[in-house]
Image (cartoon, rainbow, N blue to C red):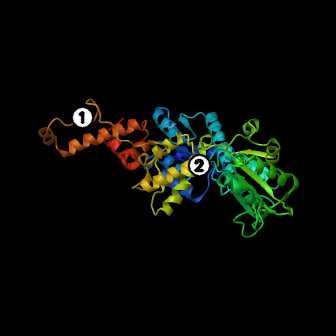
Amino acid sequence: MNPILVVDDERSMRDFLKILLVKEGYQVETAHNGSSALELIEKQDFSLVISDIRMDGMDGLELLYGIKERTPTLPVVMITAFASPNDAVSAMKNGAFDYISKPFNVEEIKSVICSATSKGNQIAEARSIAEAFPEIIGESREMIKIFEMIKRIAPTPANVLIYGESGTGKELVAQAIHRHSKVADQQFIPITCSAIPEDLMESELFGHVKGAFTGAISDKQGLFQLANNGTAFLDEIGELTPIIQTKLLRVLQEREVKPVGATQIQSVNVRIIAATNKILEEEIMSGRFREDLFYRLAVVPLRVPPLRERKGDVPLLVDFFLKKYSKLLGKEVQEMSSYAMEVLMNYDFPGNVRELENIIERGVALESSNIILPDSLTLSTFRFGKKEPDPPPNSRFQAVASEEELFERGLEEVMGDLEKQLIHTALEKSDYSKMRAAELLRISFRSLRYKVKKYNIE
């Protein structure tokens, strides 16, 4: 188990928590402030961070923000004074696993830490499983189940039918099955059934001989000959015509193909992985898909969940696509603002991962700063970041009555009032999250914290 990091600017509190945790069998490291904690986190792995919120210099909320930037899955438990419930709420909204209130209840501390370390261990185990599948980005519980199923079925020769909406990554799952199979050194040949004209489908699947039809100027191998001893991936299998379904069934039953125009039958040994975004059982009921073919294909059915069912993977996917398109488009956009991320987390992604990739590519292309803000997100036909309507007369942004009053008060006082009003509004819009308010104002968290203290904003 990785150690626990305790962060507090009071030595007595660090010592108390260290003694308590060591007695419970944990390994413990300590840091006296947020900056030292981040340095330790850069150098070694931790299973949990316990941090006080109120500290000199970098406070606990800034530390939490820094941790989530570096290691989003690392559980963080915050220590909060009994008189600061707003701090606890802000910490939870910004990714804290839980919080412990002062004065301490020792049994409560043990319970929270046990839950947090257990969660951390689960995340570490999930990450270990996910690392075996670099072609698929995901650490959510739903994707871990997919990875575990791939590990079980890949070494077998069983045919697999992958269900999933468009854009969920069914071909990536098929590639992962092949890569973990006993024929990983052989060919993986994909074909999209809906992309090939009906009159050419038989030739594409089974091949043809020279002179079989107009334009057949030489012999050609089909999908199954090319994938012999390897894996053939049939995407959008539900689009096959009844005639082709019948011929495919023979390939599955007899392990042999007959090229178009040929007199000789050729033996093939191919593992078939098929995929569909249709509900084939309904296609069978309507007579559009053969039931016997379905059972031959679906020896092992596997469903890839849509992105809306695995929202926990959105930050990982966003980070991957940000790096990909920043490099591809020659931009320095490496970060998504938390407010923009919240917009994405509340979106259903009808186009799934493919749509998210498109959103991030467009966002990187449109963004002029080094962080993607909601203005640069275009989700479906709705444009985020529209200009707000003019404020009503009784809003905080009332116009100054006259030039005389302006000059009488002086520039510094007028600008100070405007700055204070803007900060108030940003805090209201961000539900009093200082991190999100700083992003709206396009200033650093440290600057906002200074200005909040300067203007005595509650």
Q: Secondary structure at mark 2?
A: helix
Q: What's under tag 2, amino acid-wise?
A: Val
Residue found 65% across the figure and 39% down from its top: 115
Q: Could you tell me if residue 132 is visible in this image?
A: no
Left or right side of 342 for 403: left
In the rendered image, which quarter is residue 390 located in? top left
Disc ID at residue 362: none
Q: Is residue 110 above or below residue 327?
A: above
Residue found at the far front of this picture: 214
Q: Nearer the viewer, mark 1 or mark 2?
A: 2
Residue at x 47% of width, y 37% of height: 87
Looking at the image, the residue that sits furthest to the bottom is: 218
Q: Nearer the viewer, residue 445 or 191?
A: 191
Q: What x and y, as percent, mark residue 263?
A: 85, 63
Q: Residues within 10 Å of mark 2 (few under 14, many from 20)?
A: many
Which amino acid lies under the numbered mark 1 shown in the image of this protein? Gln
Q: Closer to the camera, 87 or 316?
A: 316
293 or 148, which lies in front? 293
Split into 4 quadrants, where in the image is the C terminus?
top left
Tell me residue 347's x, y (percent): 53, 40
Q: Is residue 76 visible?
A: yes
Q: Which element is circle 1 on?
A: loop
Crowd band around label 1 with a 10 angstrom C-alpha radius: few (<14), some (14–19), many (20+): few
Q: Position of residue 213 (x, y in %)?
A: 73, 63
Earlier-in-chain disc, 1 versus 2: 2
- Tell me the CA gap for discs 1 and 2: 45 Å
* 304 with respect to 337 (left or right): right
For label 2, the residue is: 353
Report whether 108 appears left or right of 267.
left
State the residue position of label 1: 398
Residue 387 % position (x, y): 35, 41
